[in-house]
Amino acid sequence: MAPGRKRNRGKGDSEPTTKKAKSNAKKTTDNEITTKDDPIVAPVSGVIENGQGDNGSSDVTAVPRETTADGRRYNLKIASWNVAGVRAWVKKDGHKWLCEESPDIICLQETKCAKKDIPKQLKDMSDYKIYWNEAKSVKGFSGVALLSKAKPMQIDYGIGVEEHDQEGRTITAEYEKFYLVTTYVPNSQRGLKRLSYRMKWNEDFLTYLKSLDAKKPVVLCGDMNVSHLEIDLANPKSNRKNAGFTQEERDGMSTLLESGFVDTYRKFYPDLIKKYTFWTYMSNARAKNVGWRLDYYIVSEKWMDNVCDNVIEPSVMGSDHCPVVLLMAIPE
């Protein structure tokens, strides 16, 4: 349950082979959509209420932690969600949950939508500025979005590598104290057709993150398209050679976490099982909770003391993924 309300893989996307295109990494220009005057600061979000644990069970994540270890209350709430097609998602009323939660920053992945076709329901969320990065290589493919109540100091689209930036996979927002990076990591695909490309992405993306981290702490969120540990998916033994759980992909996540970054969920809940963020639509997987944890908040190690909690919201519908919320106490 996220603050402010009561709790009431082989994942197979069809990704194209990479084509060379002009880099989409650029500063804030035409991808910004102004919905109203900029707020000076992002407002503090709502109050935590008691509720049951996920799926009606009792567990340590039932009531989110609203303070850091040293007692500072959160003043920033981020919601991240792979919407698996933003136009289909709004038809399922996924945006209404976000309106109720009123996070300070919203990050969406796999939007599959051109900027000119952004749904009215998002444009009507007048508290937010909208930043949109669409795929240039294939229409209706990939794509990420970032909605922010406070205007970032700067927005960058892509990571500055042509072969990656054509696919609309990353937005970076620079705020006063930190960088926020939202990403949709390439899927290695059925038969691992894009595994070699994925390995190149991992290398280039880590270089990019480290370059940011050298200047300011980084908060990374999105669909990382890998379950890092065996407890991060329901059926590890049968998926070792499938996209999202190959040793190569898992090693890539290990390398990232060994480079000065922290998986916030496993930092708080190192042994918690059956906590997933993606379920295939097949075989009634979500009802059976046969899923994968693919969606992460990863922060600079030096910034971890400012994190209050990472909350998975499995009961929230609208996509084959569920939203994930991060609560942070940003230093004054």
Image: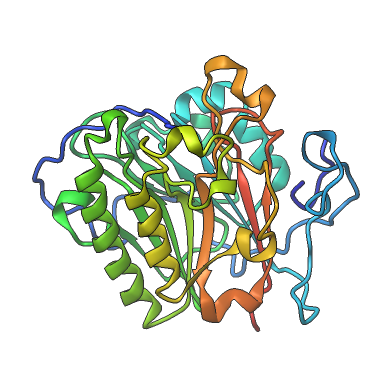
Looking at the image, which residue is at 35% across and 29% down? Answer: 13
Q: Is residue 330 visible?
A: no
Q: Is residue 278 visible?
A: yes
Give the colouring mode of the picture: rainbow
Quadrant the C terminus occupies: bottom right
Q: Residue furthest top?
A: 283
Taking the image as shown, residue 81 lies to the left or right of residue 258, namely: right
On screen, residue 269 above or below 319: below
User: Which quadrant holds residue 29?
Assistant: bottom left
Q: Who is closer to the viewer here, 82 or 4?
A: 82
Looking at the image, which residue is at 18% across and 37% down? Answer: 137
Looking at the image, which residue is at 77% across and 40% down? Answer: 54
On screen, residue 162 above or below 216: above
The location of residue 97, given as percent across then percent down, is 68, 37
Taking the image as shown, residue 323 lies to the left or right of residue 122, namely: right
Q: Residue furthest front?
A: 237
The location of residue 301, given as percent across then percent down, is 52, 77
User: Which quadrant holds residue 187?
Assistant: top left
- Total marks shown come to 0
Q: Who is closer to the viewer here, 191 or 161?
A: 191
The location of residue 174, given as percent across then percent down, is 43, 70
Q: Residue furthest left?
A: 20
On screen, residue 72 above or below 299: below
The location of residue 312, given as percent across then percent down, is 66, 47
Q: Who is closer to the viewer here, 199 or 67?
A: 199
User: Which quadrant holds residue 189?
Assistant: top left
Looking at the image, which residue is at 59% across and 36% down? Answer: 234
Taking the image as shown, residue 68 lies to the left or right of residue 149, namely: right
